[in-house]
Image (spheres, grey):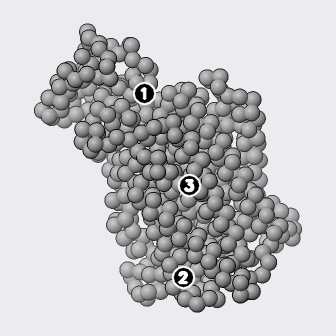
């Protein structure tokens, strides 16, 4: 017999509530799984009746009472701590019968997490390292990577201790509903900012952009000339309809593993071409010595160094997808190893891109380094290499977009409908939310002209909270008594660095707006 029986009738939730012997985490999952509205399908009724004679994980329990709740009673639909994503238990009972899914592989998880990390941030890193100086810049990349690994490890350990399936669930365990809502708001702000930046870069690659009064033409405009269908808005609309729409329709993050693998490969192509061009020009003696230390001309240039930190922080943000990826693994205990492999790979890509980008372009490195690849590189087949770099990275961003959108949709849904059934089981809400978010992102991509402005805003605020402040605060709260002295020391350091650098970055942005050549006007 089963410990939890559900009969589905039109407009009702029918849930057995005598599951006291089951663990709290399983109980929460079961409640979330089965207390779902149905449309009275006879197939659903027969399926649930069949569960009466189906063994459930070796547990035998005789139900003795039944509670029927109307679907309009939202109070009992889902606890705020209930997972937003389909859990393995749910997969075993339903989706295994439909698709044969038996858990995600380690390689697929590494690709998905790496794709989450290596997004648009790689394009702003050469300018960041050039501003900091080559040596301090590369050291900072490694340092932020180490802090990111520590913060993710904190999230993983406290998720297991609290039996939480999502990052927001870990925050709820430590700080209650307000903490959960605040974290979800930060994730939404960060991911929205990132996705807007992705579309901006895609528009720059395909249609072109204006930088300091100079027109950098896009590849489509170069190939076919200026037409209405090569305009920025038309190209972004086509990309949204024919690329983004199919990819953001998946309800499982593991479904994106193949596109993530292709995305990682395209990023490597970009790095390889950049490195190859830089090495050829270096051998020909056409490259000067890069600046090893920051150039400080006045007080404004000093404070402007701190604006690079949000860009570095944004480049490593993947915390919102760590637990959804872990939930789908065949062996969740491998998640720590997956995180380490992904961060090692991404750090290597970041270091190589920054080093060769600064070496190749020097002080002429633009905030979006892709804009540098639309002129003569000074080597044979320069035009072909320019197009190959821009097209490969434009395609890379198109494939990164859906995996970041996945987390955005989950957290927006968690904020707006905290007691509803998981969005993956409500097609109407799933598709309406998807359309609304895509419309918002599309409009934002046509009104934010500078990638640097977008990265500074999201990086100095929400990204710092998601990546460092919340993991550190959860560790310091230590509701389960598992944090060590070293954990708390690292947490205090993360909070100090995050708050201080973000504050200085925001002040520096304001200072630069009202100053000319370092003098307040």
Residue at 47% x, 29% y: name it: 81
Query: Could you tell me residue 439's position as x and y percent?
Result: 41, 59
Which quadrant of the view contains residue 465?
A: top right
Front disc: 1 or 2 = 2
The residue where tag 1 is placed is 79
- Image quarter hosting the N terminus: top left
Secondary structure of the residue carrying tag 1 is loop
How many marks are shown on the rendered structure? 3
Looking at the image, is mark 3 or mark 1 earlier in the sequence? 1
Relative depth, front residue between 312 and 147: 147
Q: Residue furthest top?
A: 64
Residue at 43% x, 30% y: name it: 82
Asked whether, in this view, residue 453 is left or right of residue 239, the answer is right
The residue where tag 3 is placed is 117
Is residue 420 visible from the viewing direction of this image?
no
Tell me whether circle 3 and circle 1 mark residues in contact (CB < 8 Å): no
Looking at the image, is mark 2 or mark 3 earlier in the sequence? 3
Residue at 52% x, 76% y: name it: 390
Find residue 385 and name its label.
2
Secondary structure of the residue carrying tag 3 is helix
Q: Classify 10 Å Cα crowding around label 1: few (below 14), some (14-19), many (20 and above).
A: some
Secondary structure of the residue carrying tag 2 is helix
Query: Could you tell me residue 109's position as x and y percent?
Result: 47, 48
- Image quarter hosting the C terminus: bottom right
- Distance, label 3 to label 1, CA atoms, is 30 Å
Find residue 154 and name its label.
none
Query: Could you tell me residue 353's position as x and y percent?
Result: 64, 68
Which quadrant of the view contains residue 355?
A: bottom right
- Distance, label 2 to label 3, CA atoms, is 25 Å
Q: Classify 10 Å Cα crowding around label 2: few (below 14), some (14-19), many (20 and above).
A: many
Asked whether, in this view, residue 236 is left or right of residue 182, the answer is left
């Amino acid at each position: 017999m089963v410990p939890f029986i559900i009969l589905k009738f039109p407009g009702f939730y029918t849930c057995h509530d005598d599951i006291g012997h089951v663990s709290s985490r399983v109980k929460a999952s079961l409640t979330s799984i089965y207390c779902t509205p149905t449309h009275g399908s006879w197939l659903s009724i027969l399926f649930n009746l069949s569960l009466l004679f189906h063994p459930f994980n070796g547990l035998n329990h005789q139900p003795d009472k039944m509670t029927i709740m109307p679907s309009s009673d939202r109070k009992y639909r889902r606890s705020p701590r209930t997972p937003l994503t389909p859990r393995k238990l749910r997969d075993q009972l339903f989706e295994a019968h439909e698709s044969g899914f038996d858990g995600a592989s380690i390689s697929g998880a590494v690709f998905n997490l790496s794709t989450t990390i290596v997004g648009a941030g790689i394009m702003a890193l050469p300018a960041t390292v050039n501003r900091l100086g080559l040596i301090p810049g590369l050291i900072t990349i490694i340092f932020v990577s180490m802090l990111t690994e520590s913060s993710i490890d904190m999230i993983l350990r406290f998720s297991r201790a609290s039996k939480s399936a999502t990052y927001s669930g870990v925050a709820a365990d430590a700080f209650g509903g307000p903490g959960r809502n605040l974290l979800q708001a930060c994730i939404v702000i960060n991911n929205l900012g990132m996705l807007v930046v992705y579309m901006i870069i895609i528009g720059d690659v395909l249609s072109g952009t204006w930088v300091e009064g100079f027109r950098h033409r896009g590849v489509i405009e170069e190939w076919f000339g200026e037409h209405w269908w090569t305009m920025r808005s038309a190209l972004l609309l086509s990309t949204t309809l024919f690329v983004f729409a199919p990819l953001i329709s998946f309800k499982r993050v593991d479904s994106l593993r193949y596109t993530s693998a292709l995305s990682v490969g395209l990023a490597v192509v970009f790095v390889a071409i950049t490195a190859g061009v830089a090495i050829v020009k270096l051998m020909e003696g056409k490259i000067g010595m890069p600046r090893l230390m920051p150039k400080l001309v006045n007080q404004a240039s000093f404070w402007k160094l701190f604006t690079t930190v949000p860009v570095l922080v944004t480049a490593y943000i993947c915390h919102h997808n760590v637990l959804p990826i872990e939930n789908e693994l065949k062996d969740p205990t491998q998640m720590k190893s997956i995180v380490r492999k992904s961060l090692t790979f991404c750090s290597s890509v970041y270091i190589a891109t920054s080093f060769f980008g600064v070496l190749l372009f020097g002080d002429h490195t633009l905030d979006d380094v892709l804009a540098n690849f639309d002129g003569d590189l000074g080597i044979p087949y320069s035009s072909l290499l320019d197009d190959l770099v821009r097209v490969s990275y434009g395609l890379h961003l198109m494939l990164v977009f859906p995996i970041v959108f996945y987390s955005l949709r989950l957290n927006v849904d968690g904020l707006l409908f905290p007691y509803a059934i998981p969005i993956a089981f409500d097609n109407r809400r799933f598709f309406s939310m998807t359309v609304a978010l895509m419309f918002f992102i599309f409009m934002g991509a046509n009104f934010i002209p500078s990638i640097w402005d977008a990265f500074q805003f999201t990086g100095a605020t929400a990204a710092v909270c998601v990546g460092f402040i919340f993991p550190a605060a959860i560790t310091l709260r230590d509701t389960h008594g598992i944090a060590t002295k070293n954990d708390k020391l690292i947490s205090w350091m993360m909070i100090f660095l995050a708050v201080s650098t973000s504050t200085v970055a925001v002040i520096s942005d304001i200072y630069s707006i009202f100053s000319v050549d370092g003098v307040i006007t």
